[in-house]
Image (cartoon, rainbow, N blue to C red):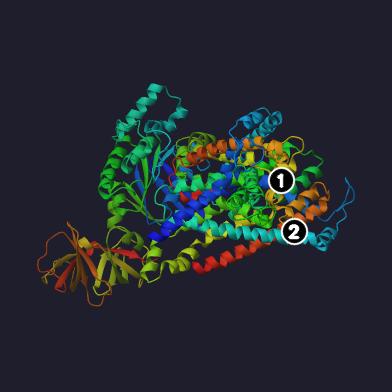
Amino acid sequence: MYNKNNILFFYAIVYFAFLYLPVMLLPVFSFNDAIHMVFPLKGFTLKWYDQMIHSSRLHRALMNSVKVGVIASIFSTFIALLAAKAFTKYKVKLRQLSYGAILLPFVIPEIIIAVSLIVLWTGMGLQLGLVPVTISHILFCTPFCMLVLISRMEGFDRNLEEAAMDLGENAWGTFWRVTFPLALPAIVASLLLSFVISFDEFILAFFLSSQDQTLPLYMWGQLRFPKKLPHVLALGAVIIVATSIIVMLAYWLRNLGSPSDKKSNIGGI
Amino acid sequence: MSDKEFIKIKNVSKNFEDVVAVDNINVDIARGEFFSLLGPSGCGKTTLLRILAGFEYPSSGSVFIDNLDVTDITPNLRPTNMVFQNYAIFPHINVKRNIEFGLRKEKLSKDELDERVQNALKMVQLEGYEDRFSNQLSGGQRQRIALARALVKQPKVLLLDEPLGALDKKLREEMQLELRNLQRSVGITFIFVTHDQEEAMTMSDRVAVMNKGKILQISPPRDLYDNPKNLFVGDFIGQINFLDTQIVKIEGNIAKVLINKLGEHELVTNNNNLSQNESIVCAIRPETIIISKTNEKISDICIKGVIANTSFYGNMTYIYVKIEGLSKPIMVSTSDVHDGLSHNSDCYLNIHLKDIRIIQKN
Amino acid sequence: MIRFWQKIYAKNDNVKAYSLLLPALILVILAMASPMLLTVVTSFHTQVSMMEIDTTLTLDRYKDFFSKPVYTMLLVRSIKISFFVTLVTLITTYPLAYYIAFYVKKNKMLWIVLMTLPFWTSYLLRVFSWKVILGHKGVINSALMVSGMISEPLSFLIYSQTAVVLTLAHAWAAFAILPLYVSLDKIDKSLLEASYDLGNTKLETFWRVTFPLSLPGVIGAILIIFIPTVGDYVTPQLVGGTDGRMLSNMIQSLFGRANNFPLGAASAVLMLLSVSFVAVVVTYITRKVSLRMS
């Protein structure tokens, strides 16, 4: 028993290094006083961060990403909440089919969704831009939110809602005074996680936007110019830190009140 | 008239896909009655209760409470309140807010609310628990909070869905008495669902025995025990002996019957549906049979047997006696100490005709 | 009138359920199903000029696809690369999932969180990091050269299929570990003890008991990794070069510079069909395997 333990442990550490290395590189080079990302390091500097803060195009892209992210996360969480409610509360006819259908956008290669939406959108004569991007993000995030919410709602005591009704509350009162407060941690976690997904999403934005860039599109554009690279690294480092904080917050919230639920791990993707 | 039919369940049926959960039930429940629905799991008692509460819509039939047709009325507007099997205490608010929960609509002042909550807590003997949360309460305490929460709304009918099921035996017995006393003091009609026949018998004014969606018999507990109307009820309530019997002749209310291995006897019966040569069952409660070592005939029937088994229960001993020719042993219960009656020893059973009940097979 | 509908609503659980599901279903139908349908239809059209599309139905685009070897080659390569990515990811992630499920006693959740955290950072930047790491002047090459192990940078590391597989295996690690971990964790430990008790070695127990029982997780991981990878764009674009180019890069140019929507649509349809085919086969095998096990 002992030998395997040590080998596997060693392997785990090595694997973790492999996982984190690329991620760590970015912040390291973002403080490096050089244009190219090569060793050895040249010296500590904050000028790339300075450049990042003062780029107005970056700000516009950031604002766009935030706008899209907020709208997408609110809509997908809401739609997913209703769907999660349906699946956990009722024995739905054709359950597998509906469940699979709603999960589909998550499983199909993004490029196919992107391409299809371009065909539809331009076919209708509409302009590409942030609107189709937002719609595609809502489509993409909803299945994910649904998984998060279902994993939390599965442990939900159905009698609690019936008790509320029995005590005099109508459907709205029951939702507001019982269902919603109990689901709140999961709802916030869903909002946070779907925001992050939308914020980071590239392909759909790439295909469906035109003039207005989201942050990933901005970064993609900058990657071609070596001189611009370091400030993108600075941006990347900031994003990594911010995202990690948000995600850890979301994980903590999701597990509030439902201790070590194995199923909830899948929702933690 | 309306007091005896305070609750009227009329031709109520409920189907789930192809399963008939409740099969054309007709019941009248009196005002202020402690009424139990008793039966094995799956018999439809909980479904029927939920129909009364409004959580299930009957496939056919209607429900009347205090002369009002409540069939189409949603649960929140019915004059009923329910105590759930797992208590359903809201985990995100404290005991005080739980109990107040249903009073929001009544727009009471803060003082009035506090008073009502205090009274409710006093009623279930949990004063001082206002600030606790559900996870800080034991099962029995949660049950009482659920009770308080329902009663504080002063409903016309209280529905209880196996509320004592999760409690241990001693606590359960305490709660049974408490519930009975509580019901008597508040005077509300209680409808109690359970699978435990002792529980139903202890607390109820009347018990309805259910099986497979149908009500088989409604009687006060004593009556249910002494005069079971069919095999299922007889077997479900307490212990019983069944003997195959054939009707020889019927004259008025006297039936001449031939009981397997016990000979031909005349029994008094109120049943008008018996026919000659009909194959029926005679039921005898174990405690009515007298067992002794001697061949003394002190009653109408005396037969000899061999003791096959005994089970000691503290206050009661069950003795299983094998009678020659009968496939199943006869069960006798006695609270006396019988020396000399041991495994494989001979014994004599005395049975009074008045203790024999006729039950039709169907 | 409203009361009539209210009654139907209150009586019928299915009505209630589907009214809750409606927004999600509408979303999927409007934003995914119909666009995809439209794409299929478009694949039967012809791009006449910059702005014009001839809508007479024709199978020519599919003929075009299969007649030019480069298209088929890209499709096959995409599937091949996805296959290798799936394999590499599974092989490298499985031991870790096993370790966390069987050897970690406290704070399992913490391990899982740490495993999945890198995944939440920008995918774009992670791929770019690999470009840096694998590049001619990148971390690996400069380290090897400085230590004297090689005199010239290893060329196969970047702008190759190897680079694509490596980068994607890294990207999907977090996705793979979750289903693997869940199914391993679910295994009743007493089954393993029973196996030892009956005389099996550790290795035998693994092959005969643990691995088969973890198959649902393995299948889940396979589907999660394989299907999206076939259509990946960013990684081949950044680190694939010519050797590592995949079908999605081609599709992107057909919708962009090359401006041939119908052909792009046909390529997308073919990609979807191949992916669906694989998914169906995998699901079928899964069913057979789990039937045998239960």
Q: Residue at x 17, y 67 (%)?
A: B350
- Front-most of C171 and C112? C171
Relative horizontal placement of residue B45, taking residue B198 as reference (left or right): right
Note whether residue C276 is visible. Answer: no
- Front-most of C250 and C9? C250
Mark 1 belongs to chain: C
Disc 1 designates what residue? Answer: C30
Relative horizontal placement of residue A4, taking residue C130 as reference (left or right): left
Give the quadrant of residue B349.
Answer: bottom left
Mark 2 belongs to chain: C
Q: Residues within 10 Å of mark 1 (few under 14, many from 20)?
A: some
- Say yes or no: labels 1 and 2 on the same chain: yes
Disc 2 designates what residue? Answer: C74
Disc 2 residue type? Answer: Leu
Q: Residue at x 56, y 45 (%)?
A: C118
Q: Is residue C263 above or below residue A53?
A: below
Q: In x, y percent, where is residue C243?
A: 72, 57
Note whether residue C268 is visible. Answer: yes
Per the image, label 2 sits on a secondary structure element best described as helix
Q: Residue at x 79, y 49 (%)?
A: C253
Q: Is residue B147 above or below residue B275?
A: above
Give the quadrant of residue C272.
Answer: bottom right
Disc 1 residue type? Answer: Leu
Q: CA distance from mark 1 to mark 2?
A: 30 Å
